[in-house]
């Protein structure tokens, strides 16, 4: 085969290979959108090493937020590493720093046993307090369907899922990595009845 034909054959084969590679690895629309959202999500780390007795409730509360918002991801920090959200167990009423907490920032959640002693649900408490760190204030009084209504619906309320408006507010706070530019509120929200 003459040299020029050989180069043309190699060039054609390379072009076909390059053209076929993206098609073979193509991702459908919804999957691509999901990947884009995950890649664009703000990652916040939490440390619950001082929240003994609350581990299951914290894991459930974190899972609720990760399942219901796309623009922010909560990830447990490795021991000894930086965490934006410090979660501790206390004997008082639950309270938290009002965010939105920014990457590299610092916020605190206190999971108070006084609320549990009075009959409030631990998972709802954990999800609610994390909601404060994500920028949501209390909406008291409010119905059980509003996570941020806190203790106002009473001890029978077990809803730990933010409603559509609460989800949208967190999405907006972290859209286009906005939380990295928006200062956190910083007030401490105490959730006593």
Image: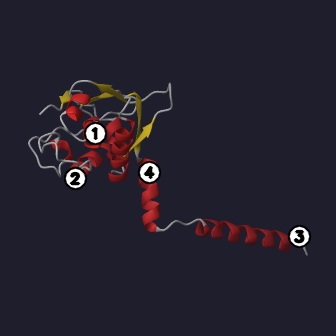
Where is 190 relative to 146, above or below?
Answer: above
Q: Quadrant of the N terminus?
A: bottom right
Residue 106 seen in render: yes
Callout 2: helix, strand or loop?
Answer: loop
* Residue 149's disc number: none
Q: CA distance from mark 4 to mark 2?
A: 21 Å
Q: CA distance from mark 2 to mark 3?
A: 68 Å
Q: Quadrant of the C terminus?
A: top left
Circle 2 residue: 163
Circle 3 residue: 3
Circle 1 residue: 122
* Residue 38's disc number: 4
Where is 25 relative to 120, above or below?
Answer: below
Q: Position of residue 9 (x, y in %)?
A: 80, 73
Of the numbered discs 2 and 3, the one sitting upstream in the chain is 3
Residue 95 seen in render: no
């Amino acid at each position: 085969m003459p040299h020029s034909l050989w180069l043309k054959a190699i060039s054609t084969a390379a072009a076909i290979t390059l053209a076929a590679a993206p098609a073979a690895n193509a991702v459908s629309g919804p999957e691509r959108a999901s990947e884009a959202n995950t890649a664009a999500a703000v990652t916040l780390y939490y440390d619950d090493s001082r929240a003994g007795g609350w581990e299951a409730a914290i894991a459930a509360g974190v899972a609720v937020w990760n399942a219901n918002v796309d623009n922010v991801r909560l990830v447990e920090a490795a021991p000894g590493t930086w965490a934006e959200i410090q979660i501790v167990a206390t004997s008082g009423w639950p309270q938290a720093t009002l965010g939105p907490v920014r990457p590299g920032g610092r916020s605190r959640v206190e999971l108070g046993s006084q609320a549990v002693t009075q009959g409030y649900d631990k998972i709802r408490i954990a999800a609610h307090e994390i909601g404060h760190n994500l920028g949501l204030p209390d909406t008291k009084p409010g119905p059980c369907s509003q996570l941020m209504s806190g203790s106002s619906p009473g001890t029978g309320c077990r809803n730990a899922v933010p409603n559509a408006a609460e989800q949208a507010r967190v999405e907006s706070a972290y859209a286009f990595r906005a939380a990295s530019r928006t200062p956190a509120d910083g007030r401490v929200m105490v959730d006593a009845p």
